[in-house]
Amino acid sequence: MSKKKRKNEEDGTARNQEIRTIINNDNNTEAAVKEEIKSLNEKIELLSELLAEKDRLVHQLSNENPRFQEHYNLLATKVVEKDTVISTLERLNTRM
């Protein structure tokens, strides 16, 4: 076998190995991305459940105490800073 032909075969083998490596890396990346998507979907589902629970509690509290709804609306619209409301509530608690 001539040196040129042997060199071409070695180059072909090296290219094939590089192609296999790239394909394996792509498969590994695809699997990692699928796993990350699954994890993110689980987190989204959990957050949705938490938001639903929060809404349920806010609704329950607003039915029990109409003033709560007013305060909650102020916080939700960011008319009043949370720190201000919290410090006011803490002062009221210490007076009682």
Image (spheres, rainbow, N blue to C red):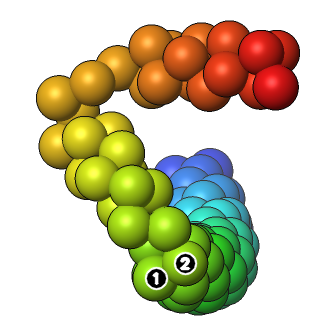
Residue at 68%, 12% (x, y): give it.
91
Point out residue 83 in the picture as x, y percentages from the top left corner: 50, 15
Point out the residue furthest to the front here: 96
Point out residue 89 in the picture as x, y percentages from the top left corner: 62, 26
Between the residue at mark 1 and the residue at mark 2, the CA separation in whole angstroms equals: 4 Å
Q: Secondary structure at mark 1?
A: helix
Near-viewer residue (35 or 76): 76
Near-viewer residue (72 or 88): 88
Do callouts 1 and 2 mark residues in contact (Cβ within 8 Å)?
yes
Which numbered dot is residue 64? Answer: 2
Residue at 39%, 55% (x, y): give it.
67
Is residue 45 among what the camera can see?
yes
Relative vertical location of residue 48 with respect to residue 26 in this rendering, above or below: below
Residue at 35%, 20% (x, y): give it.
81
Point out residue 28 in the picture as x, y percentages from the top left corner: 70, 73
Q: Secondary structure at mark 2?
A: helix
Give the image quarter of residue 79. Answer: top left
Q: Quadrant of the N terminus?
A: bottom right
Which numbered dot is residue 63? Answer: 1
Is residue 24 among what the camera can see?
no
**Mark 2 crowdedness (10 Å alpha carbons): few <14, some 14-19, many ≥20:** few
**Mark 1 crowdedness (10 Å alpha carbons): few <14, some 14-19, many ≥20:** few
Relative vertical location of residue 19 with respect to residue 4 in this rendering, above or below: below
Q: Quadrant of the C terminus?
A: top right
Give the image quarter of residue 82. Answer: top left
Q: Amino acid at mark 1?
A: Asn
Q: Amino acid at mark 2?
A: Glu
